[in-house]
Amino acid sequence: MTQAKDVVSKYQEAMGKGDWKAARLHLRDNLEFRGPLDTFHKADDYIAALQRLYPMVEKVDVKRVFAEGDDVVVLCDLHFKPPMPTMYVVEWYGVTGDKISRVQVVFDPRPMAPAPPK
């Protein structure tokens, strides 16, 4: 297991337990996050957004993890509580030293978008 993969694994383990404090310890303060719905430049803002999202989540089913150097890619199914559908998610982590410095998430955001006005 590479060091970067180990860092991401520990972060995800903390997230799976809902241990926000432990998860935050694995993130650099100036974490850069990019996703279909949000962009953050601070780890605390990212964690706050995850805390709002996770009450809707039933489980995360990790399918594959790829690591090369300081990059780690996680492919997973994000299972939401009904009526939200399961989403296929790609997470690309960048690790600097012993902390996550960058996260880019790719998924189809349509189920989370507000309905268009009629």
Image (tube, rainbow, N blue to C red):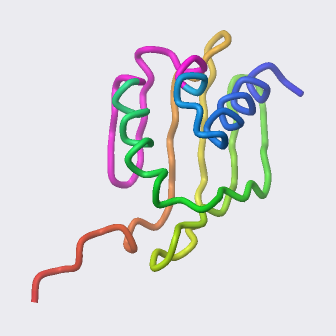
Between 44 and 8, the one lying in front of the other is 44
Q: Position of residue 79 (x, y in %)?
A: 60, 66
Spot the residue most to the right: 1
Spot the residue most to the bottom: 118
Q: Where, by quadrant of the figure, is residue 47 drawn?
A: top left
Residue drawn at (71%, 36%), measured in percent from left and top? 13
Residue drawn at (79%, 25%), measured in percent from left and top? 6
Left or right: where does residue 38 sit relative to residue 56?
A: left
Q: Position of residue 60 (x, y in %)?
A: 66, 56
Between 105 and 84, the one lying in front of the other is 84
Q: Where, by quadrant of the figure, is residue 96 drawn?
A: top right
Spot the residue most to the left: 118
Q: Number of marks in the image?
A: 0
Left or right: where does residue 70 sit relative to residue 100?
A: right
Placement of the C terminus among the 4 image quadrants: bottom left
Between 75 and 50, the one lying in front of the other is 50
Residue drawn at (80%, 19%), measured in percent from left and top? 3
**Residue 103 is one of the magenta-drawn residues:** no
Residue drawn at (60%, 20%), measured in percent from left and top? 26
Placement of the N terminus among the 4 image quadrants: top right
Spot the residue most to the top: 97
Q: Position of residue 68 (x, y in %)?
A: 78, 31
Q: Which residues are magenta?
A: 24-43
**Residue 36 is one of the magenta-drawn residues:** yes
Q: Position of residue 16 (x, y in %)?
A: 66, 43
